[in-house]
Image (spheres, rainbow, N blue to C red):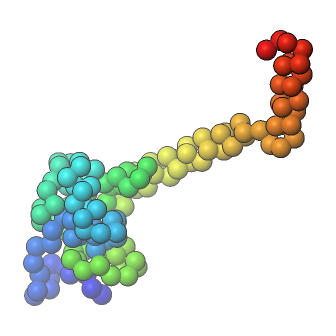
């Protein structure tokens, strides 16, 4: 499977930055290190360093773009594998999933309201015509 569990004989400590990279939260280890150093990743509620050893059933809270995720470590790996394998390394908490979906809905609603503010071609022509008439009449 690629993921190490606590029963394997070659089990060793896995760094937090390597685990985040292997679980596919960040594309590179250096991005994972920057996120940890920047305070965007919390391990068991506290700020951590990139070399922090990850333990099973630990809670990790991290920011990815607009979303904030809280995951529970279910497997350890320091090797990046396929996405289905990476998803087996963690489980997102139910409250985190609900909050993420609500925030996505809010962003969708906000974006939809901004799209309707921009005038279409017909409305633009009417506005230009109105501006020309105001300029010609000297009201502007």
The quadrant of the picture occupied by the C terminus is: top right
Nearer to me, 133 or 124: 133
Which quarter of the picture shows residue 16?
bottom left
* Residue at 14% from the left image edge and 85% from the top image edge: 8
Nearer to me, 111 or 57: 111
Q: Is residue 116 above or below residue 130?
A: below
Residue 74, position in %: x, y? 27, 70
The quadrant of the picture occupied by the N terminus is: bottom left
Which quarter of the picture shows residue 54?
bottom left
Q: Is residue 131 above or below residue 34?
A: above
Nearer to me, 46 or 5: 46
- Left or right: residue 92 versus residue 128 is left
* Residue at 83% from the left image edge and 43% from the top image edge: 121
Residue 49, position in %: x, y? 14, 56
- Left or right: residue 67 versus residue 42 is right
Residue 122, position in %: x, y? 87, 41
Q: Residue furthest top?
A: 139
The number of callouts visible is 0
- Left or right: residue 70 versus residue 42 is right
* Residue at 61% from the left image edge and 44% from the top image edge: 111
Q: Is residue 57 visible?
A: no
* Residue at 22% from the left image edge and 60% from the top image edge: 33
Q: Is residue 39 visible?
A: yes
Residue 112, position in %: x, y? 66, 44
Q: Is residue 105 above or below residue 26?
A: above
- Left or right: residue 83 versus residue 128 is left
Q: Is residue 79 above or below residue 16?
A: below
């Amino acid at each position: 499977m690629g993921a190490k569990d606590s029963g394997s004989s070659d089990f060793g400590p896995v760094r937090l930055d390597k685990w985040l990279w292997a679980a596919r939260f960040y594309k590179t280890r250096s991005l994972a290190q920057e996120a940890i150093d920047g305070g965007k990743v919390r391990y068991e509620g506290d700020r951590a360093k990139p070399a922090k050893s990850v333990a099973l059933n630990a809670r990790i809270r991290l920011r990815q773009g607009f979303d904030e995720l809280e995951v529970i470590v279910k497997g350890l790996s320091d090797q990046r594998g396929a996405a289905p394998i990476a998803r087996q390394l963690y489980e997102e908490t139910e409250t985190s999933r609900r909050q993420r979906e609500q925030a996505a809905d809010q962003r969708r609603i906000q974006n939809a309201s901004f799209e309707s503010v921009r005038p279409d071609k017909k409305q633009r022509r009417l506005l230009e015509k109105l501006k020309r008439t105001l300029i010609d009449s000297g009201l502007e």
